[in-house]
Image (cartoon, rainbow, N blue to C red):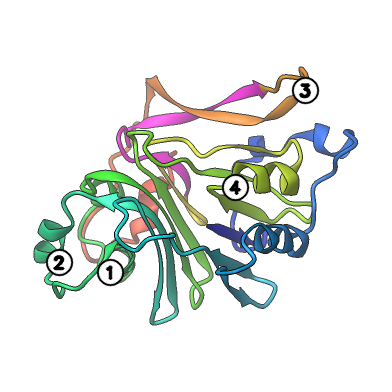
Amino acid sequence: MLAIFHKAFANPPEELHSPASQKCSKRPKLPEDTLSDFLSRHPDNTFSMNFGHAAVLAYVPPDSPLTKDRRLFCGFEDIYCLFMGSLNNLCSLIRQYGLSKGTDEAMFVIEAYRTLRDRGPYPADQVVKDLDGSFAFVVYDSKAGTVFTALGSDGGVKLYWGIAADGSVVISDDLEVIKEGCAKSFAPFPQGCMFHSEGGLMSFEHPMNKIRAMPRVDSEGVMCGANFKVDKYTRINSIPRVGSEADWTNQWDSH
């Protein structure tokens, strides 16, 4: 999968950008060139959607629909979701949210996002932590212009993110596409973490601990983005607000 968001709609950590990207022989590419590269790697069955200058989503269906680790794409009421992997407890989550039996993982993530956005009865970290399985997802709310993404903690699915030539955020499971499109300004998306364009990056496993950017050096000895790790020794002093009257992104304010 591939998701690209204009810098005005997504605010990634500054440490993701490496100054070396402008000095090395291989420079970051513009979003349209990265999309072209992704499409050329999967010429037969790739699907993509363009949202003007704001965003682009691209999706490659799995070779077999029966595979356990699925790749899914769906949209509902101007909310779009790219999902990879599988949820072991999908059936119980469907019952908990009162959804139809035919709901797949991508449809469920959209519904969970809508619940957080519109009613916000639970902390977002608890909602994501309740997902049991190997997963990664990217949600784009085209009406609100917000991005919400998360990666499971078991390492079963890989996800990467980086910065394009124009400052756009690039998210993909295809490491080669990320390397070509972002040069030195990329990193693995941290396991057990979630990112919201208005709230930033936080751990859903350890929501009361800060995230630290650790310098990442590649095989050539060049500073290359950053690895983001949970600082288990630095805790957040405030307690996130909950309740239907609270903005669910407020829980990120202290991170």
Looking at the rendering, the stretch of residues picked out in magenta corresponds to 200-216
| Residue, disc 2 | 97
How crowded is the residue under tag 1: few (<14 C-alpha within 10 Å), some, or many (20+)?
some
Q: Which kind of residue does numbered mark 4 sit on?
A: Pro
User: Which label sits in the foreground, 4 or 1?
Assistant: 1
Q: Secondary structure at mark 2?
A: helix
Q: Compare residues 242 and 66 and report the one nearer the observer.
A: 66
Residue 19 point in image, percent of width and height: 80, 34
Dot 3 or dot 2: first in sequence order is: 2
Q: Is the C terminus in the top left, top right, bottom left or bottom right quadrant?
A: top left
| Residue, disc 1 | 111
Q: Residue at x 57, y 51 (%)?
A: 171
The answer to which image quadrant residue 235 occupies is top left
Q: Compare residues 80 and 60 and report the one nearer the observer.
A: 60
Pointers 2 and 4 in contact (CB under 8 A)? no
Dot 2 or dot 1: first in sequence order is: 2
| Residue, disc 3 | 222
Q: Compare residues 163 and 247 and report the one nearer the observer.
A: 163
| Residue, disc 4 | 12
Dot 2 or dot 4: first in sequence order is: 4
Q: From the viewer's perspective, is 134 left or right of 182?
A: left
Q: Which kind of residue does numbered mark 3 sit on?
A: Val
Residue 2's label in the rendered image is none
Q: Residue at x 34, y 31 (%)?
A: 237
Q: Secondary structure at mark 1?
A: helix
The answer to which image quadrant residue 99 occupies is bottom left
Q: CA distance from mark 1 to mark 3?
A: 42 Å
Pointers 2 and 1 in contact (CB under 8 A)? yes
**Numbered disc total:** 4
